[in-house]
Amino acid sequence: MTHTLTAKEQSLAKIFSDDYVFTIPGYQRPYAWGKEQAQELLDDLLGAMATAPEQISEAAPYFLGSIVLIKSEAQSEATVVDGQQRLTTLTLLLSAIRASVQDSAVQTGVTKRIYEHGDVVSATQARYRLLLRERDRDFFRQYVQHENGLVTLVELTSQLPDAQARIRANAQVFMTGLASLSQTELVRLVQFIITRCYLVTVATPDLDSAYRIFGVLNSRGLDLSATDILKAEVIGGIAPDLRDAYTKKWEDQEEDLGRDEFGELFSHIRMVYRKAKPQGTLLKEFKEHVTPAARPHAFVDEILLPMAQAFSEIGDADYASQKHAEQVNEHLRWLNRLEFKDWVPPALTFFVRNRNQPELMLKFFGSLERLAYSMLARKSGVNERIERFSALTSAIEKSQDLNAQQSPLQLTSLEQYETYAALNGPLYETHSPRAVATLMLRLDHLMSDASASYQHDVVSVEHILPQQPAPNSQWLTWVPDPLKHQQWVHRLGNLTLLSRKKNSAASNYDFEKKKNAYFTKGGVCSFALTTEVLKHNEWSEAVMQARQERMLKILEEHWSLQGRKSKAELAQSKLVERQQASGDAVFELESTKHGLNATARETGSAFTVFAGSQAKKGDWTAQPHAYQQLRESLVNQGAIKPSDDDSCLIFTKDVDFSSPSAASATVLCRPDNGRSTWRLSGTTITYAAWQDSLPAGQAASGRTER
């Protein structure tokens, strides 16, 4: 009878014997265990050995987990689907014991568990118990599996790829940990590991079955990342004759970026396609929205590789072009300083499409910096950022005009106003220390004519006028009014930067001492902001006012905030515009609770809701009403139908209503006073307020509702 799956509990004496020759296939992730896992393994084994009886053979079995293999029972060759980390680390530990123990017989015994020497007379090659991925195989043989290699490895100082660097780091952990053991304890440890430590081997001769087992074990919490599973699925879907080539493409990018950043890249790619706040795991949403396994070649060649290259250049601010490269990289450097990364998906999308058009690159990333820093200043929440940057990604994919006023890349007049207001407010009090430092570093760079370069490990924001001036101090002669002090102390005009951690005692120095001992280092100041402070002999309200205005002017010009308008200003200008215009007025209805947005036009004879407007999904829950019949009729006619994602209803065409209330009731699926609900587009002005501003004789559908 043929067994399709076997599961056995086996000691390491069996695992590291002629019964198995383990091969790590090329599509596996690189070796990833760090020093913490290596130290934990060693500590656990030493702890278990310490409680074992004097006769090791009587010690309780110690379970080390499971491994998944593609292997037939008749052959020793086994492809490791899951278990690479355990097998590699255990081999590394055995090698470290061999390098630490002095008994040559023990050394020979350990070597037999690692590899068998070749025989010149029999013309046989060395036979290794574990074969790592091709790119790490020779390194592992030379420094881990062969005798005397480990001592050389731990002293190696050259730069190594991630996987090999981890092997070296873990070798150092083991050699350090074993150095405290006596020779007797070393022998006892290796005996315990080989004879009393066990792995469960789950083996199947079928590739597909092994992948299924692999997926099931991963879903139950084994130490595998989402990118590992995706790699197994994508590479597994490629024809065998191309699998090695595509594995190399994948791993070259993973190695170039580093494992952590490679995982981050997948999160950004997910957002490029998801365009909404994640609701599930990366693996689940990647499969649903990116579907890499459906077209594995295309995913690697057309999505992963271009995005990885763009991600690398964006993260390193290393865009190369014959024109504007330095200016583009300048914007990228400042984007990378932000405490959020929601801007990366649209940046990737644009970069991949337009990298060979430097004029477009410069304009886009200048505008992207403006938008992102505006959101930092306005303290936009994560949901708002995701929604805005997702809209920008969509606009890029649709080749929309990103310079148009209504583009999601551009700031509205109100957003400009709110940005300026935040910058002009008590920043130190309202924003996080990191946000304030980032904004001030950007300002400092602009004040230095973009010549400053910052390499400081610690940058802190300092008040010039102290937060709590000492009684009878010089500061109180300049700003004696407590209200004025409170008005100025946390604003830009009173803030500067230090290139070291704050000294709370020094913050209350008098002005001259502060300038000489606190704001300079060896007579030299690091920041343009601080150099400007040193020019003043006093620190009065007038000085802070002038400095505040100059700083705001610089930011206003750099981020183009001259078109700012408050809500009141917008409302007034809209009213004047509507009163003077002979055309139709446009209104909006937004329901945050239900995530709805609808737009309509008042023509005088009808209130027309535009195609594409959203309406609430569901049944009419209020008392029966004529508007209920109207809504049901529109649904039956196909004028309103479910959206593609089935989250709401969508108007498929422009629909005329007799009044704004009829329209809002249809949108909200309940009776509603549309004169209060609909608001003039871009303002907070209600339909009723707009109607009241009209000449008495001007027609409006809402007059029927008075």
Image: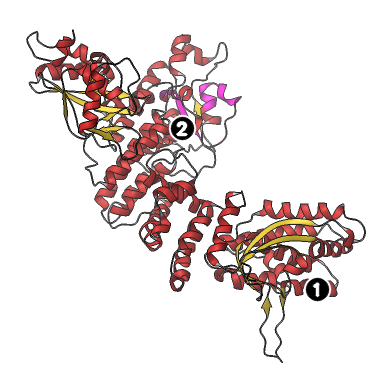
Tag 2's secondary structure? helix
Q: Position of residue 258 (x, y in %)?
A: 52, 56
In the displayed structure image, the side of residue 326 where residue 581 appears, left or right: left
Packing grade of label 1 (10 A; few <14, some 14-19, many >=20) is: few
Magenta residues span 493-514
Residue 656, above or below 698: below
Spatial separation of the CA atoms under disc 2 and disc 1: 60 Å
Quarter residue 193 falls in: bottom right
Q: Residues within 10 Å of mark 2 (few under 14, many from 20)?
A: many
Of the 4 image quadrants, the one containing the C terminus is top left
Q: Which labelled disc corresponds to residue 435?
A: 2
| Position in image of residue 315 (x %, y %) | 43, 50
Sequence-wise first label, 2 or 1: 1
Q: Label for residue 164?
A: none
Question: What residue lies at 30% left-to-right and 24% top-to-bottom?
Answer: 590
Q: Nearer the viewer, residue 609 or 642?
A: 642
Name the mark nearer the viewer: 2 or 1.
Answer: 1
* Tag of residue 109: 1
